[in-house]
Amino acid sequence: MDSQTSNVLPPPSEGGALADIASDVDVRQSSGRHRLWAIPAAVVSLLSVFAVSVAAIIPSKVVAEKENTRIGEMQPAEFARVPGSAQAIGRKVSVSVGDGGGAVPAIFEPDGDFMMVTVMEPSQSVLSWWVGKNEPAVEMLTYEDKFGFQTAEQRRVFSLEQMRTSEEVAEYVALSWLGFPAEILPGDVLISEIACLTYDAEGVCASWPPSADVLQPGDRLVSADGVELASVNDLVEVLQDKRSGDTIEVRVDRGGEGVFDTSVELTSAPDEPNRTIIGFIPFDTRRVELPFSVSIDTGSVGGPSAGLAFTLTLIDALSEGSLTGGERVAVTGTIDLDGSVGAIGGLVQKASAVEQAGVRLFLVPASQRASDVEAARRAAPTLEIVSVATLDEAISVLVDHGAVFPERPAER
């Protein structure tokens, strides 16, 4: 039989072994002086929490500055351009019968998806400035960097108009490429900006046209000299027989204020003294007439930089095969009527957003500055960034990456 040793200790006896052990140990009470160190440590911790809380409230313009290159002065930087999101738009396309009642083409469910990329420009605190000041995808902005000289109402009008124009141009380019009949129609007379007549040596406007006193960006001209204006061409005809110094009556539709009548003194074009002008640069408000209605649900996103993404999405949706090669492909760049791709802002932030979304290929405009593209590659080192100059070049790059060249419905 195996023997086992008991694990139960015998009760201590007076003068026994335990007493001998206790007599050899120097047992001391904790000194109150050691506890005093906990007080400053706690104070420091509380002050740190308080400092972080305050830094999260104080606006960054208290400590952050950026040069305004227009006037050569340092100005407070209270905003930052940061990565936004990469949104799939392939399943946001819908087609319906147009006004002409033409046949509706088939919509092909996308295998992969094209991604529309956005940036954000939120206000910054001292804390967010300090955390992001060394991040390549964070760019501090002044008030003028973000808003320019536009009012909130003007920005709203321009943003919506830019997105509408971007969508319609994309529809025209995509359908024309696919062989569908599409037509460009003239649009309203919308003022993009008041034209400067002369500049000083520093490049600052030295003289403005008289119309600057009564008109402003975002105004829509309804009529001029009693003639209803359906397009800029109508305004050109009105001004043909006018001379610099003449005054005409114009009816203006201004967001937030409504319609009103006013007088405008005309002037001469700075580069063409014999041409009479009101003195503004018009917004591109041309409309597209299609054989059927096309809709892309963009939500509240504004701006023209998704033009190429819209165009590729529509071609993919209206043709057999997979233009994405079954992958997610991020795209940015404006699209012009001739299919050329234009530069955009915030490329570094967009590249970072694309990389964070796990997308591997990002098509960007070839007209972008080389320094922008290099900075984007540094901000998103695992992302393949490919520059394209035209729609055809973009399709060629996609085919090289596994896409199927679209079959034009007109060629079936």
Image (tube, rainbow, N blue to C red):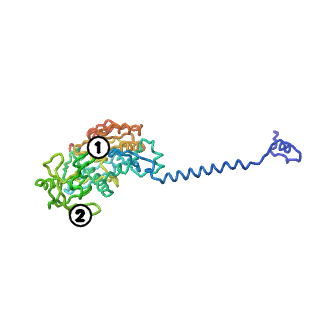
What separation in Å lies between label 1 and label 2 (alpha carbons)? 38 Å
Q: Which of the 4 image quadrants contains residue 226?
A: bottom left
Q: Which residue is mark 2?
A: 259
Callout 2 amino acid: Val
Q: Nearer the viewer, residue 285 or 114?
A: 285
Q: Secondary structure at mark 1?
A: loop
Q: Residues within 10 Å of mark 2 (few under 14, many from 20)?
A: some
Q: Which residue is mark 1?
A: 202
Q: Nearer the viewer, residue 366 or 212?
A: 212
Q: Among all residues in the image, which is located at the extreme right?
A: 15
Tell me which numbered mark, 1 or 2, is placed earlier along the sequence.
Answer: 1
Q: Residue at coordinates 77% horizontally, 48% vertically from top-left?
A: 29
Drawn side of residue 244 relative to residue 28, left or right: left
| Circle 1 or circle 2, nearest the eye | 1
Disc assigned to residue 78: none
Q: Quadrant of the N terminus?
A: top right
